[in-house]
Amino acid sequence: MLRLIEVAPNLWRVDKPSAPVARSSLPCPMVISDEMPPCEQVDGRYYTSKSEFRKIGRSLGLVEIGNEKVGPKRRSTDDRRTKAARQQALRIAAEKYKSR
């Protein structure tokens, strides 16, 4: 049952009963297990260990989505030759427009 309490003159709050944080009955509820249901890797074998599954995948050259290292993106317009060519094309277009 909720009840109102006065925390300051004319300032009221609802007094909510504090409940403990819901936890698992397991000894270490925040630990992620290495076990998984049997899963087939590209080599045709079934693995129940996440670390072994990832190790074999890396050795075969596979990339696990979400763990890949992505390099910085470069814009295609950053190249000086491209920039110079673009400026030259704009100059030519402006000259053609003015000469009409």
Image (tube, rainbow, N blue to C red):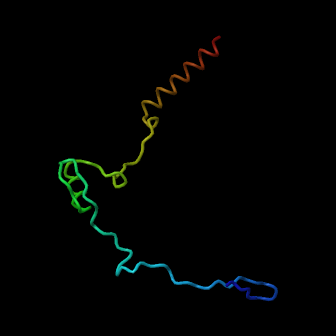
Q: Nearer the viewer, residue 12 or 79?
A: 12
Number of numbered discs overlaid on the protein picture:
0
Q: Position of residue 67 (x, y in %)?
A: 34, 55
Q: Position of residue 56 (x, y in %)?
A: 20, 54
Q: Nearer the viewer, residue 42 or 87?
A: 42
Q: Position of residue 84 (x, y in %)?
A: 47, 29
Above or below, 83 against 34 in this view is above
Answer left or right for 85 relative to 3. left
Q: Position of residue 13 (x, y in %)?
A: 72, 83
What residue is rendered at 23% in x and 52% in y? 40
What residue is rendered at 46% in x and 35% in y? 77
Name the quadrant of the C terminus. top right
Answer left or right for 83 relative to 64. right
Which picture quadrant has residue 19? bottom right
Which picture quadrant has residue 1? bottom right
Q: Residue at the top extreme?
A: 100
What residue is rendered at 18% in x and 48% in y? 44
